[in-house]
Amino acid sequence: MGKFISIEGIAKRYPAPGGGQTAVFEDLWLGIGQGEFVCVIGHSGCGKTTVLNILAGLDEPSAGTVIVDGRQISGPSLDRAVIFQGHALLPWRSVMGNIAYAVTSRWRAWPRAKVAAQAQRFIDLVNLTGSEHKKPAELSGGMKQRVGIARALAIEPKILLMDEPFSALDALTRGTLQDEVRGICTATDQTVFMITHDVDEAIYLADRILLMSNGPGARIAECVVNALPRDRTRADMHRHPAYYPLRNHIMDFLISRSKSFAADMAADYDPRHPPVVKPGIPEPQLAPALVAEGGPARRSGAPSF
């Protein structure tokens, strides 16, 4: 199975004071399988959002390319939906109007009834039934973000790109939305690339967690495979024997190893094949395809790509 998303040697550089260039990140390579949920964690300044913007077609790499579903991306596309930290709703449109606007952008020839049915389907999925005619000013922060999520999913994108979409919400609302997004993405086999600073959020949602070293000159330091079962729940994931080894491994990277990665980088580090680790599971239990490709085993034992 081929890579659904292939990030091939991308870099982002800016002019440096006094001449030359500063590389935010350099020579990033990554493959993501269709239906895979990938989270990226790293300190501010490592270029996480820039990578997401390049995937969205909102920015261009200084070097390298990105291939999605066999085609090089050259700009924004309705095949790639973005959910930002802010909801960015149209204030003069209702919940239904905001989502219907996205649907008509995707399918211009659809009759009004079909557009409304598509919008209603995703309003129901994010538990906003009954709020269809409310304007953004009448909604709580969590409800606004629900509308943003429904709007992104209603166009049935090939890729969902999320830039810390829950970071501004209170803990209870954040947890509820994480549950809803996880359920929807699992049910629809949605491919997701998400930025987060929340370690437990990444463990709960992701199939793989990418650890980025500090910028400038950031790299993908490790591809960490989530050994927890895919049908995990929030209430019991901490009971799994791999949970604390996984969490401790990520925290150790963020606290110490991320700072010294460039100095400690092994001579055999290959940016095309960043190290794959699976904390909490003995190495012999790693499938050969997993070690070679850097992705989790998927349904029916198939590799992710």
Image (spheres, rainbow, N blue to C red):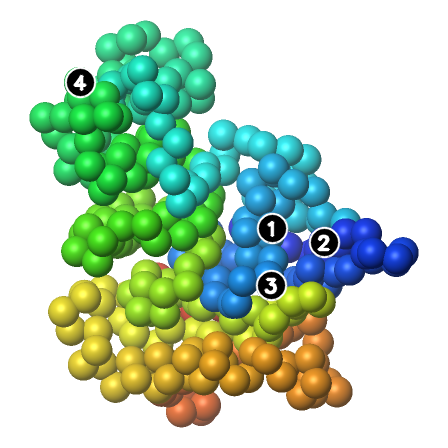
Q: Are marks 1 and 2 in contact (CB under 8 Å)?
A: yes
Q: Amino acid at mark 2?
A: Lys
Q: Is residue 287 visible?
A: no
The single residue placed furthest to the left in the displayed view is: 130
Task: Count residues near mark 1 (Cα–Cα under 10 Å), then give few for <14, some for 14-19, many for 20+.
Answer: some
Q: Residue 278 at x, y = what percent?
A: 43, 81
Residue under numbered circle 1: 50
Give the vertical position of 135 relative to 123 (above or below).
above
Q: Nearer the viewer, residue 169 or 182?
A: 169
Taking the spot 18% from the left edge, 21% from the top edge, the residue there is: 134
Q: Amino acid at mark 4?
A: His
Q: Nearer the viewer, residue 184 or 152?
A: 152
N-term-proximal mark, 4 vs 2: 2
N-term-proximal mark, 1 vs 4: 1
Taking the spot 46% from the left edge, 46% from the top edge, the residue there is: 161
Q: Is residue 47 visible?
A: yes
Residue under numbered circle 2: 12
Residue under numbered circle 3: 46
